[in-house]
Amino acid sequence: MNTTAEGSVAPRRALLKISGEALMGTGQYGVDANTVDRIASDVAAVAQSGVQVCLVVGGGNIFRGLTAAARGMDRAQGDYAGMLATVINALMVQNALEREQVPTRVMSAIHMSSIAEPYIRRRAVRHMEKGRVVIFAAGTGNPFFTTDTAAALRAAEMDCDILLKGTQVDGVYCSDPRKNPDAKRYDHLTYLEVLSRDLNVMDAAAISLARENRLPIVVFNIHEAGAFQRVMRGEGLFTRIEEAS
């Protein structure tokens, strides 16, 4: 049985949440091909190590329902448009993974059979058991729910051992370290600490869902090459969120 550097059992099945913003690289909009290729290389290395991997991809680099709603667009319509943006990103990630010789399946919560399989839980589990990376697109398929909530939901449905969120910084801070150089980074937090301190790691629904299912959350910097592999071994900088021991 594989173990991490800390001696604990390595995850058998993991879900990685990739935000749409992470796919922009240093750009302001859209998808940076080099960034997508690097992330795909990291995901491929983890998948090829024997871990069953699934992904949830956001769409904020293309369209944000909340932003559109603030400008007067109907919120539900805006969220549906955002779901379509996640499908575009999922196809980009799928293409990059397949260039790494990793078999993949995109499964969409909104039916669009020409480009993606419909989300069926048992089928998704079977894909992972066969060594395929499953990319979940279109969030939960419902407006008013973020892709963070979709990530927690899919991780629970897939019986994942861990939920990882790749961000722009190497963990959870008390404030944005890019704006406040004195911001404190946390190594460990409980779900309740995240909620009570309003740390904006994930939305409250996602944190609560993870807590109910005793699903550990690990937050790390997805922009560092090889970070996903290191975190899966319990190495490098990251913040782990779980129930108090």
Image (cartoon, grey):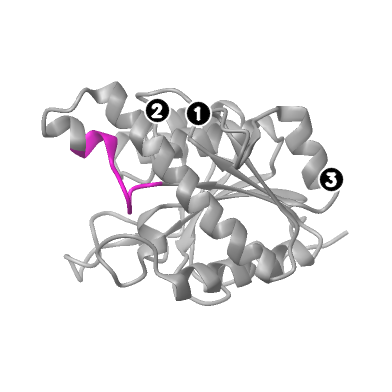
* Mark 2 surroundings: few (<14), some (14-19) or many (≥20) residues within 10 A: some
Give the residue type that dot 2 points to.
Phe
* Mark 1 surroundings: few (<14), some (14-19) or many (≥20) residues within 10 A: many
Task: Tell whether 58 sits left or right of 92.
Answer: left
Q: Confirm whether the magenta stretch covers residue 192.
A: no
Q: Which residue is mark 1?
A: 140
Q: Quadrant of the C terminus?
A: top right
Q: Which residue is mark 3?
A: 129
Please report the residue visible at 35 percent of the width from the left and 57 percent of the height from the top. 21
For marks 1 and 2, the one nearer the N-term is: 1
Give the residue type that dot 3 points to.
Glu
Where residue 196 appears, as percent x and y from the top left, is 31, 34
Where residue 132 appears, as percent x and y from the top left, is 77, 52
Residue 77 image-quadrant placement: top left
Task: Tell whether 35 sits left or right of 101.
Answer: left
Q: Quadrant of the N terminus?
A: bottom right
Kindly report the distance in space between the C-alpha atoms of the residues bearing marks 1 and 2: 7 Å
The main secondary structure of the magenta stretch is loop
Q: Are marks 1 and 2 in contact (CB under 8 Å)?
A: yes
Residue closer to the observer: 133 or 4: 133
Please report the residue visible at 54 percent of the width from the left and 42 percent of the height from the top. 242
- For the question of whether residue 209 can be seen, the reply is yes
For marks 3 and 1, the one nearer the N-term is: 3
Kindly report the distance in space between the C-alpha atoms of the residues bearing marks 2 and 3: 28 Å
Q: Which residue is mark 2?
A: 145
Where residue 71 appears, as percent x and y from the top left, is 11, 34
Residue 10, above or below 13: below
Specify start and end residues of the magenta stretch as a single range: 59-67
